[in-house]
Amino acid sequence: TPESFTRTFTRFHGITPSAARLTLAPLTSFARLSIQISMKGGERMQYRIANKDSFRIVAKGTRCSEEDEKNREEIPAFWERCHRDGTIQWLCEHREEHGTIGSNIVGLCMEDSRQKENFPYLIGAEYGEGDVPEGFAIYDIPAMTWVVFDATGTMPNAIQQLWHRIFAEFFSTSEYEPLGNYDLELYSDGNMGDPDYHSEIWVAVTPREK
């Protein structure tokens, strides 16, 4: 209505429409809104959808903080401790090499780190048989659908950059959404400092509601 227009005009410009027509008072102006999208070309994100049966892992865990992305430092530090104290060596010697995740050593989040400030992070391998040392525990991973991403590059940069791309690029347009209960990082044997080192990220997913 003319009345509401006058009120809004006055509130925005600090002067009534009639006064604006009669004076040279300055008015507020905005340029036309434009949206710029920055896109990186030529980078492929390889992934596949995999339906996997349940499996069991044996692992040792710690808790990490999502606050100020502290987990980006805490998780690599936990891997270093596990290398020094013999955890990784024990896992390599007792892993089930022909199971669902093969001979890979895994990093596992069992809670949604994006929703919690403090979350458990585990380092383990697929459980075969035998006694479990103190400090380790056995975890059952249920059958579910995973989206699997391939990473190539030195650790931890390659895996951290891939995590960022997964949520910035893949899930923003995908027909799947993360369940938020299980995220796996699979690390193959080899030199993690090698630019050609191969690793994978598995994210438990469900079809997105339309």
Image (tube, rainbow, N blue to C red):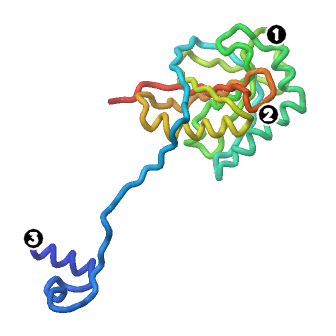
* Labelled disc at residue 1: 3
Q: Secondary structure at mark 1?
A: loop
* Labelled disc at residue 130: 1
Sooner in the amino-acid sequence: mark 2 or mark 1: 1
Q: Residue at 42%, 35% (x, y): give it.
A: 173
Sooner in the amino-acid sequence: mark 3 or mark 2: 3
Position in image of residue 141 (x %, y %): 62, 19
Q: Residue furthest bottom?
A: 23
Would you say 204 lies left or right of 206 here?
right
Position in image of residue 42 (x %, y %): 53, 36
Q: Residue at 70%, 40% (x, y): give it.
A: 157
Separation of residues labelled 1 and 3 (CA atoms) = 80 Å
Q: Amino acid at mark 3?
A: Thr
Position in image of residue 179 (x %, y %): 50, 29
Instruction: Identify the image quadrant of the N terminus.
Output: bottom left
Q: Is residue 194 above or below residue 113?
A: above
Q: Residue at 17%, 89% (x, y): give it.
A: 19
On the image, numbered disc 2 is attached to which residue?
193
Q: Residue furthest left?
A: 1
Nearer to us in this view, 183 or 28: 28
